[in-house]
Image: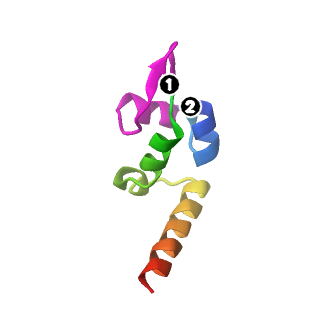
Amino acid sequence: MTVEQVAQFTGYNKNSVSKWCSKRQLQSFFIRQRYQIPKEYLLDFLVSRYFIGITVKSFKHQKFNEQIRKLRDAGQN
């Protein structure tokens, strides 16, 4: 996936996604002057402590956290 696609999917700005890649918080490949993010790397990132701990959350991030909590709660019952 491209930085733009990840930004659209997560609800965050392209600059945030690029920063995550450059700081290696989101694993990616730098090919032809662009970050390429494999879907499995994105999934790992979405459930990481770093992503869940982001202070300023996008609306999509808030919804994602709600879904994770529901799944976790359902698994404990």
**What residue is at 62 percent from the left and 32 percent from the top?**
4
Residue 70 vertical placement versus 29 (above, below): below
Question: Mark on residue 77?
Answer: none
Question: Mark on residue 3?
Answer: 2
Residue 36: x and y in percent read 52, 27
Q: Earlier in the sequence, mark 2 or mark 1?
A: 2
Q: Residues within 10 Å of mark 1 (few under 14, many from 20)?
A: some
Q: Is residue 33 magenta?
A: yes
Residue 47: x and y in percent read 43, 55
Viewed as shown, does residue 52 lie left or right of 6? left
Q: Secondary structure at mark 2?
A: helix
Q: Secondary structure at mark 1?
A: strand
Residue 55: x and y in percent read 42, 55
Residue type marked 2 = Val
Question: Mark on residue 35?
Answer: 1
Please give the range of residues in magenta: 15-34
Disc 2 and disc 1 in contact, CB within 8 angstroms:
yes
Residue 52 vertical placement versus 3 (above, below): below
**What residue is at 42 percent from the left and 57 percent from the top?**
52
In the rendered view of the protein, which quadrant contains the N terminus? top right
User: How many numbered callouts?
Assistant: 2
The colour style of the image is: rainbow
**Quadrant of the rendered structure where residue 6 is?**
top right
Residue 77 vertical placement versus 28 (above, below): below
